[in-house]
Amino acid sequence: MHRAGNLVAATLLLMFATAVNGVERRCAMQKPEFISEAQAIERFQLRRVFDIYGNGEPPAGRVVGVIEGDVCVKGDLLLDDAHALEKLFAIRSRAPGDFAFGGDASQIGLVVTGDLEVLGAIISSDVNAGPFLIVQRNTRARAIYSGGAELRFVGKTVVSDAVIGEDNYASTMFAGGLEAPVVVVSRDHFVAVEGKKPAFFLLRRDHLPWSDITRWSTFVHADLAARARSVDTGDTDDRIDMEKELLPRVRRGLPIVAASFHPGRDTDRHKTHEQR
């Protein structure tokens, strides 16, 4: 019996190791190849994709990273300049699986021509700027925190936790649909979703009438429940600070949304919108 038990344990351990190694093999990150901004404008039609490109010639020396085909990031995909990346690494040290893009000021954007899978979160933390991201096929991530970077998802996007839009300059667009428990929009961040939309929580008080959710306590994780109730019932000037309270959780891999939250059942209003 003892030997049989050891054999079973050894077999299970081998199966687990094989499964883990299988995931490791499937989740492969490849380094981007860099092309000039002028080449990227022509190849990827950036003047049509973004409003930021006028008719003039782009400055010399700037480059766009291109990853051909499918790619998997084992940690977080970080889209920020060097200063913002330092702040993110202060929240949680850089892990071997993290992929940071934009630390070199010449890197102004990243294009993935295939599917993008991020086992962690896609994070653009600087509310003023950040390298753009275009994913030409499908995307899967644990969470998305969108600050000052322009994010474009052409295929279907599936997010298991929250999608957060924090900046009032940039925009996040999901052309192939979005599956996520909730989209939290602060200030005037522009979030556009084609097709069926998830529940929206709009923090500007003049936009609340269009929110599917009007209270933090409707959807947040238990760790945030007491704080959420205080904000929901307290001083109208009190609010959950996205950068100070939500960004650290996203970076540390902690959930924003309660596991028990069901968007179709628990929203304050049963309608969805594309909102600014």
Image (cartoon, rainbow, N blue to C red):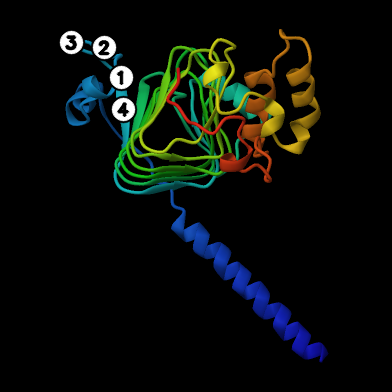
Question: Which three-letter amino acid code belongs to the residue tagged 4?
Answer: Val
- How far apart are the two marked residues, 3 and 1, measured between alpha carbons? 17 Å
The residue lying toward the viewer, choosing from 60 and 124, is 124
Provide the secondary structure element on which disc 3 rests.
Answer: loop
Characterize the local packing of mark 1: few (<14), some (14-19) or many (20 or more) Cα atoms within 10 angstroms: some
- How far apart are the two marked residues, 1 and 2, measured between alpha carbons? 7 Å
Q: Can residue 90 be seen in this view?
A: no
Residue placed under numbered mark 1 in the picture: 62
- How far apart are the two marked residues, 4 and 2, measured between alpha carbons? 13 Å
- Verify CB contact (< 8 Å) between mark 1 and mark 4: yes
Left of 71 or right of it: where is 167? right
Query: Which of the two labelled residues, at mark 4 and mark 3, occupies the earlier sequence position?
Result: 3
Residue at the image point whose x is 76% and y is 37% from the top: 222
The residue lying toward the viewer, choosing from 88 and 248, is 248
Residue at the image point whose x is 47% and y is 24% from the top: 103
- How far apart are the two marked residues, 4 and 3, measured between alpha carbons? 18 Å
Q: Farthest residue toward the front? A: 270
The circle drawn on residue 55 is: 3
- Verify CB contact (< 8 Å) between mark 1 and mark 2: yes
Left of 224 or right of it: where is 92? left
Residue 211, image x and y in percent?
55, 23
- Against 68, residue 15 (above or below) is below
Provide the secondary structure element on which disc 1 rests.
Answer: loop
Classify residue 134 by image quadrant: top left
Residue placed under numbered mark 2 in the picture: 59
Residue placed under numbered mark 4 in the picture: 64
Query: Which of the two labelled residues, at mark 4 and mark 2, occupies the earlier sequence position?
Result: 2
